Structures are given as C-alpha cells and as structure tokens.
Image (cartoon, helix red, strand yellow):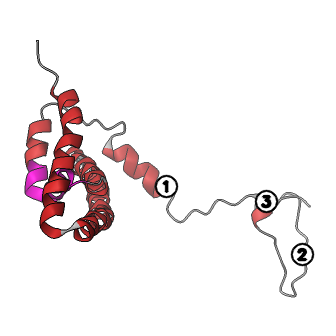
Amino acid sequence: MRFPLIPLIILALPLVEIATFIAIGSQIGVLATLGLIFASAFLGIILVRVQGFNTIQRIRTELHRGGSPGRDLVHGLMIVVAGILLIIPGFVTDAVGLLLFLPPVRDLGWRFLRERIRVTTVQTDAAWQARRHAHDGVVDLDADDYRDLSQDGEPQTHSPSDPRLPPR
C-alpha cells in the first residue's frame, strides 16, 4: 500500500512556511518580509499573464498546424500552478512557483507526465480547416442589428421577396 504523500505535504506546508517566515523575518525585519510577500504575489500575477499569453499562442499555432498541443497544455497548467504558488503567502511556495516558471523545469514535468496523460482531438485537421475557412469574412446580423437607408437617410422600400432585408 502506497503512503499518501499529498495529505502529509498539505499538513506540513503551513508549519514549514511559518518557520521560514520566522527565520527570514528575524534576519531582514517584519516590513521587509511583508514587502517580499507582496512583491512575490505581484510578480506571480505578471508572470502568469505574460507566459500564459505566450503559451496560449503556442497552443493555437500547434492546433492550426494540426499537431497535438499536449506539451503546451501541460506547460500552461504548470504556469497557472506557479502563479497560484506565488500568490499564496510564503517563501517555500514562492521558490517552487519560481522554479515552475523556468521552461527546463516545466520540460521535466512534461517528460514525467507525457506517458500518464493523453490529449485527443475531436475533429480531423481537414474538417477543422474547412469549418474555419467557411466562416471567414461572414458577418451574421439579426434584423435588429441594421437598417437599410437610402442616400438621403430615409428608410428604403424594398421588395418583400428580397432575402437580404427583413419585412417591415
């Protein structure tokens, strides 16, 4: 029987964080410690935004090429986890969060998870491309979204058989 490691980590993490707060606070002072905590949260928000948008762009590019975005999806998940760890007050969680922002560390995580997850696509590349190009340049409007005006600004009369305009 495997020993559940996650509950042990969840129970031990607050104790480790408190001990780290005390150790760092006694060295640099309370205000500097609080400043570091707020700075790490702010840094986490900025890094998630920047690296998250880059990851989303790589996922879109990979899907457009017809490839599997598994690696980039896992990287995106690790970036979100890293941001959450940086936002949580604590120096140990900040250190782990900063490590997860490094691409080589995320690649190690991807190598570990690659055999354990499966990314599947629903549509074939040809079906996706055909549907994507079928809607290029199409603007779909309801009857309330437009009015047909003549040159002088007055509503124009039209034939009831005109399929482009709704009946008035």
The residue indicated by pointer 1 is: 134
Instruction: First in sequence, mark 2 or 3: give its number.
Output: 3
* The one of 71 and 36 positioned closer to us in this rendering: 36
The disc labelled 2 sits on which kind of residue?
A: Pro
Does residue 72 lie above or below 33 as drawn?
A: above
Q: State the separation of the CA atoms marked 2 and 1.
A: 32 Å
**Circles 2 and 3 in contact, beta carbons < 8 Å:** no
Element assignment for label 2: loop
Is residue 101 rendered magenta in the image? yes
Can you see residue 65?
Answer: no
Q: 130 left or right of 124?
A: right
Instruction: First in sequence, mark 3 or 1: give its number.
Output: 1
Dot label at residue 60: none
Element assignment for label 3: helix
The disc labelled 1 sits on which kind of residue?
A: Ala
The disc labelled 3 sits on which kind of residue?
A: Ala
Q: 130 left or right of 108?
A: right
The residue indicated by pointer 3 is: 143
